[in-house]
Image: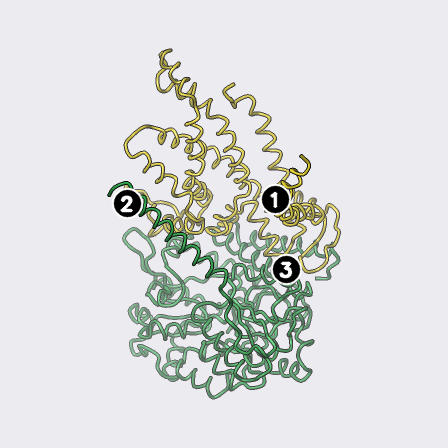
Amino acid sequence: MDGERRRKLKKAATAAGACILAAFLFGWFLESPEPRKYPEREPVVFWHMWTTEWKVIVDDICTRFNESQDVYEVIPLSLPKGVADSKFLLAAAGGEPPDCMAEWHQVVPQFANSKLILPLDEIMTAEELATFRSQAYPIAQKISAFNGRPYCMPLALDVRACYYRLDHLHQAGLIPASAPARVATQAEFEELRAVLPQTLEELTEWGRKLNVFDSKGRLVRLGFIPQWFRMFASVFGGGFYDWENNELLISTPENLQALTFLAEQQKAIGFDRMERFLSSLTTSHGADWPFATGKRSVSIDGQWKVQQLHKFAPDIPYMTTPIPPPKSGGKKMAGWVHGNFMTFPKGAKNTAGAWAFTLFWTGQDNPERASEFYTRAGWLPPSPAIAETRRYRAYVREHPQFQTFIDILASPNIESTPPVPFQLQLYDLIKRADESAMRGSLTPEQALRKLNDEVDEILNRRKEFGHEN
Amino acid sequence: MRGQALKGYLFISPWLIGFALLVAAPFIASIYLSFTHYDIISPAEWVGGSNYKRLFTEDPLFWKSLVVTLKYALVAVPVGTVLGVGMALLLNLDVRGIRFYRTAFYLPSIVPMVASCAVFSWVLNPHIGLMNSILRGIGVEGPAWLTSEPWAFYSLVMMSLWSVGGSMIIYLAGLKDVPASLYEAAVVDGANAWQRTVHITLPMLTPVIFFNLVMGTINAFQYFAQAYIMTEGGPEDSTTFYALYLFQRSWRYLDMGYASAMAWILFVIIMLITALLFKTHKKWVHYGR
């Protein structure tokens, strides 16, 4: 190619590049947001953190609400969960909060204490409030409470239970050969429940028998290991909050017993070995969930896994039960519960519309309608009224394992994170104490004492600033 | 002349306004906020020196995060400097394909941080990661890099060397600036390659080393993203860097007054260390005069 032609080609390529860049920039600048479908209605700005398959369901609920009436239009916006709270705070501080925001972080008491969100009793009618107080599960009311007032509307609750791989149990000879190989009916579900461990000690013993190691002593399959202090504190009859006297409980004999038990189990298998094993697992969701891939025989997980197993690994034979209590001093049907809840920022433009949307979603006025959303997503409802609907019962018949979670939901022994204004910090401190005890860098006594001191220090500082709690 | 100055200010006024509103004003406001209890939403409450007192006397995590950050600055900055200078010296050689090597060694420094973190999370996976697979090949069982002490900290130090190409390019530019006449004179005097490097190259490079040392130290004290993404401060706070703890205090616990006090302490520390570096630089930095 001669010099002249090369120069021409270069010019043409530069011109083409400039045109493409200009077209891209113009397209970008001129791009308009998706137009509203119902511009004549009052907008209800709704922020949430759901993504992927969940976002589709949430978007559908919004669409259904928009189609159900002609006053409001809900405009959903999914925010990345890592920055959702800071965006929300800045929007609220700037006087432009959304009309409602679905949360799952431990922020309600903190936001309520800062008067950032409205108490529900200022939004609901007296009748709606009475219905909420009489119908919602006690744990749903605990999650929403701060200083005796409800500050959020639970949308769905997250409860955890034991998942057992029946094929692993059969192979290890831990359940009778005559026991059903898989659960298809309620009768099989009940039959299997009777042969599964009734105490935590028995379960951990099964876990040891189900562990599989390779020739170098590395863990290849984990039978069972109890984890999460916040989960097991209530299983041992402890917990972190006295709901009657509204006081934090940290250094109690039950909590110490729970932390000591967890640390002993961890020590038996080796923290380093556990870390290596856990880091070899790809993800804890969908088809790659270690329980589904056979890397865990007994796992503690949430109710959403029932639907995921049905969807991604329908052939896996499994069974669910509540976490069994220890032989002495424990509580049945205990554990830690969290959930998703709707908050209503102070200063929002359309709180009435946001509340109408929340009522539509949670079905306080029409449980049958709401049961469609809850069964579609595999969510645990905030109220037994939904769990008792025809559609929800049919869903449980189709997924018998779901019954375990519904049973736990009504239990008085389940606990949520204490409703203190520094809930997120307390949650982090409990996790830190848990980690120190599991690694063995502190004894359970030391870890608990340190946690107690840290909490005291926070309380003292709050008192110094004139706060009551 | 005045008219010209006015035009100049008019041209830079967008930047000046932006700086005043988005940098200077928050900077000054944070001095006041550091003496308050402030959660963004409620009005700030004046608490005097309480935040500072608590930081120095009652917050062990403050001291731990400060020690972790100091340790990082003391390890990562010198190692990064040595490696950067070493690489620049090698990439200054006149060998075939040197442009390719320069590009190849510079490339990692322009890879987005999050992407680098994702790659390193896999490389350092104790079970299936590249690092331990190589170690296993020579009969060594590598540690759980990101989840055990003290390896998590050193993994982050090691990862910081991945992007040393950025400073290497500056060293390389500095090397190109060394007058050839100095080398010619040294050759005439009979100096060998080592002597030329120690007595000409390195002294002539000290202004660039000094610049990178100051910038590297400041960056080390502001180290945040990698620890936030890869270790979240763990295990057991062994990678809770100062900036990470500051972020947790401000945006996770909404303790903005406390975080402002932390930010000001960090500012003073950085200023002191920078002043110290400037104080010593006359003794070891040569400007070729």
* Palette colour of chain A: green
Whole-percent x and y of residue A49? 51, 66
Respond whether the residues carrying marks 1 and 3 are from the same subunit. no
Left or right for B166, reference A86 = left
Occupied quadrant, residue B161: top left
* Palette colour of chain B: yellow
Spatial CA distance of label 1 from label 3 is: 48 Å
Q: Earlier in the sequence, mark 2 or mark 3?
A: 2
Whether residue A329 is visible to the viewer of this picture, yes or no, is: no
Left or right for B101, reference A303 = left
Occupied quadrant, residue B278: top right
Query: Between A436 and B107, which is closer to the camera in this rendering?
Result: B107
Which residue does the image show at 66% across and 81% down from the upper left? A129
Whole-percent x and y of residue A308? 39, 72
Chain letter of the residue beneath label 3 in the structure image: A
Q: Which residue is mark 3?
A: A422
